[in-house]
Amino acid sequence: MDGDKKPWDPSQLRKYDLNLEEIPRLHYKDPKIDEYIKENKPVVITESNIVKPAVQRWSLEYLERNLGHSGHTVFVSRNHKFKYYDEKKIYNRVSNTKGVEFTPPTRKVEMRIEDFMKRVKEWKKGDERIYLQQSLTTTVGNNIVEDFVKFDWDYVNGKQTKHNWGPLTSNLLFIAMEGNQTPCHYDEQENFFAQVQGYKRCILFPPSQFECLYPYPVHHPHDRQSMVDFERPDYNKFPKFKNVKGWEAVVGPGDVLYIPIYWWHHIESLLRGGPTVTVNFWYKGGPSTLEYPLKDHQKVSITRNVEKMLLEVLQDPKEVGPLLRSMVLGRYTE
Amino acid sequence: MDGDKKPWDPSQLRKYDLNLEEIPRLHYKDPKIDEYIKENKPVVITESNIVKPAVQRWSLEYLERNLGHSGHTVFVSRNHKFKYYDEKKIYNRVSNTKGVEFTPPTRKVEMRIEDFMKRVKEWKKGDERIYLQQSLTTTVGNNIVEDFVKFDWDYVNGKQTKHNWGPLTSNLLFIAMEGNQTPCHYDEQENFFAQVQGYKRCILFPPSQFECLYPYPVHHPHDRQSMVDFERPDYNKFPKFKNVKGWEAVVGPGDVLYIPIYWWHHIESLLRGGPTVTVNFWYKGGPSTLEYPLKDHQKVSITRNVEKMLLEVLQDPKEVGPLLRSMVLGRYTE
Ligand SMILES: [Zn+2]
Ligand SMILES: [Zn+2]
């Protein structure tokens, strides 16, 4: 970025009542990057070559010509929110009687890339929104594969080795319409979030703020997602959301945001900023030795295991809440 | 008991604001007793020979002469409450740094039986109270052993076999002063509670009322005890105690109360009724196959295991509450 002249302005950011600090931006050769990663703190890595071939070539037209003509995975939403859900956790009286009754907020469809691009171009207010989310490890055209192998794998593999991460599990390609939003959630993987085209605003919260962000039960299809609607927070149900304190960055082409494992993130393509393209790198976490004091994300993981164990032994998601309430209310409340 | 003429009157019972029903009394040959036991419901077995030799011979004088002259385990309390605590869960900076800071409400002392009996006889209001609680499997005199082997073992072993209980783990002898109280708690064993001399009032609650009775955390020395003071319930802290619904019986010489595993029980020797003598039979529960729907006591056991597991992994009892609160408040509360 050249000095103070930003290629976007604050009116392109949705308004939230949040206490936010800026995530530092560091040149990719800066050794302080490793301190951030080591301490599981987010940082924006600038001017790297991590996804340079993509930044240089992956315009929407190029992607349309080269992404391949089989179907791609596209989510369809009636509003700007694309809240993830796990289909495997939805109740089905034939195949999943232990699931949760649930109406998905978005539809998952297969779409040819030409149809996707056409709908993006012709979109007008009131239309359904769409969001392509496609693994780069599945079939994509030759040009894309060539670009992909020219990513700066030395750099990212170097970070993986240095910080003792597990294997790379996938690279996901995201093509979003302007204004599309991925509501606040956490992932159980380390993430290099590489911006290719357009601008995305990323709001992050550390795992220690678990209790301010009220994730759905682990057995719920919205597992790992916050129950709080950032645009209309229900402070009666979620009083500690008032205490939440986050970190934010707006990332543009060439920026790579490190999203540490178990960190919460809310992501939105800027308003009136055109479509955006992002590639992420998901790595499994490092080996989890229980050294004391435990890290906050390890406590989140313990919580998840308790919830999973309870569902396993109770065999019915409707019984998890009552048992947890009887365990905690009046006994462990202050 | 001969008809309506009770050897005690209601003024000998402490007053509590509780909704109570009577526990049925059944002749020991009544086949319905097995239905109660099978369904884990309490019942008073009358006119049996289970502890007949003790009922006939174990007066305080007889016990004083025959119990043996080594020390016996006696609890000393400044009031009428003898609330159990587990010494192993008390913090100690040398031997138990993972314990809980705790001042025991009673003192455990070794006392010769003559001294115990003398103090009981000479007790006057304002003095400390005492309560002998002694395993019958440790050294007792020959006469006591002879009486003990003449208990109706065929009857109790028959129940054990029929209901698939585990082994007998101990017989405890209780010698209480009138008015002594054992506050509400549950045990993890099946219990035949055989009254030998004097009258005890027993108030029981099923394991399903766990949430109304607010047991201490499992890692607390008062584990398995209710946090609610029945004489001055704090309805702000323990609102569901208002909904508690119990069962009660006053047992006298020859009565045997079946206290099912995990059932809550509050026990008190009647006011102005003289000292009481009781022998209990503790059996391990049956093999716990998880058949669905789970029984209420199995859910209590699951809760206990979650709390134990959390202490194990967090390594600090002070961290269990905050983690459970963050898991439940706003997420699993209604
Ligand atoms: Zn994510
Ligand atoms: Zn007991």
Image: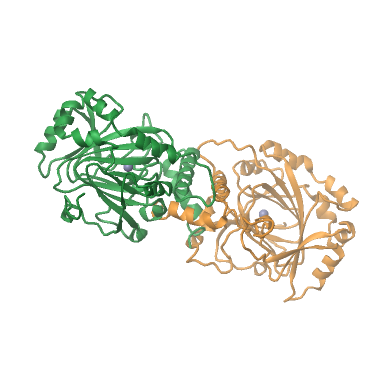
Chain colours: A green, B orange
Q: How many marks?
A: 0
Q: Position of residue B204 (x, y in %)?
A: 61, 55
**Position of B258 relative to B236 (above/below):** above
B58 with respect to B107 (left or right) = right
Q: Nearer the viewer, residue A67 or B185?
A: A67
Quarter of the figure with residue B286: top right
B192 with respect to B298 (left or right) = right
Residue name at image x 43 percent, y 37 percent: A161
Q: Is residue A157 visible?
A: yes
B149 with respect to A190 (left or right) = right
Quarter of the figure with residue B173: bottom right
Q: Position of residue A289 (x, y in %)?
A: 53, 42
Q: Position of residue B333 (x, y in %)?
A: 40, 54
A245 with respect to A13 (left or right) = right
Residue name at image x 84 percent, y 69 percent: B118
- Image quadrant of ligand 1 equals top left
Q: Position of residue B89 (x, y in %)?
A: 65, 56
**Position of B134 relative to A252 (above/below):** below
Q: Nearer the viewer, residue A216 or B238?
A: A216
Q: Nearer the viewer, residue B92 or A79?
A: B92
Q: Is residue A75 visible?
A: no
